[in-house]
Image: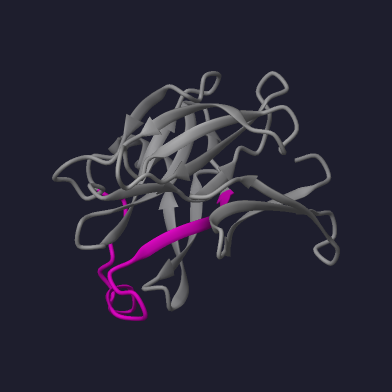
Amino acid sequence: IGEDYYLTYTAVSVNGVGVGLRSTRNWRHFTRHGLIFPPHNKDCAIFTETLSGVFFALHRPSSPQIGGNFIWLAESPDLRHWGNHRCLARTRLGMWDSARVGAGAAPIRTAWGWLEIYHGANAQHRYCLGALLLDLDEPWRVLARSQEPIMEPVAAYEREGFFGNVVFTNGHVTDGDELTLYYGASDSVICGARFSIREILASL
């Protein structure tokens, strides 16, 4: 955003799990901005541009007793103070994302809306990837969502490892219609996969 790169990360301590923020311009020197979402929260993805001067971010507060592990949207004037939280996507009973959902990398601007590749898991802790399409001007409006995963753990290195049956993305590169998705497999290795953005949108 501008000349700065912003990195959100999961911050873990005896006080809980929250979301921290760092920024850099040269990838050698980093500025720590501390926690931007307190425990229990993770899976944060900041939009790559402001809308009417407002920053937006996806995040995932967790409440195992009431509610669940859902994707939320928050707004900020300065990337430090966040509010106007809205729940965007909940888990879906009996589906591939029935136990928890969370954001992946930053949403991708397309002509049809903001495309977010997210992860979902079922009760057996099998993690797959799906997509959300959010309105360009009102990103709290969900226009479409994957009924079936766009990616599942099928290769041996995705099914077996430190934590098996997992594909989990936090980064991507776009080049026209081509989306190169970087993802962790079984919490053991880092992989890449190429997709057509148009094909993902057509599947929603």
Q: What is the basis of the colouring in this image?
A: one colour
Coordinates of residue 167 in the picture (x, y in percent): 36, 63
Left or right, 183 with respect to 156, comes to right
Coordinates of residue 201 in the picture (x, y in percent): 37, 36
Q: Is residue 166 magenta?
A: yes
Taking depth in this image into account, of 20 and 139 the one nearest to the observer is 20
Write the residue at 36% across / 73% down: 186
Above or below 55: residue 185 = below
Seen as rendered, the residue at the extreme front is: 15
For the C terminus, the quadrant is top left
Write the residue at 29% across / 39% down: 203
Q: Is residue 13 visible?
A: yes
Left or right, 149 with respect to 108, comes to left
Taking depth in this image into account, of 48 and 187 the one nearest to the observer is 187
Taking depth in this image into account, of 92 and 63 the one nearest to the observer is 63
Coordinates of residue 184 in the picture (x, y in percent): 44, 68
Above or below 132: residue 103 = below
Taking depth in this image into account, of 30 and 64 the one nearest to the observer is 64
Q: Is residue 172 visible?
A: no
- Magenta residues, as a range? 149-174
Write the residue at 28% across / 79% down: 156
Above or below 38: residue 121 = below
Left or right, 100 with respect to 148, comes to right
For the N terminus, the quadrant is top right
Left or right, 106 with respect to 96, comes to right
Q: Is residue 168 magenta?
A: yes
Write the residue at 61% across / 37% down: 47
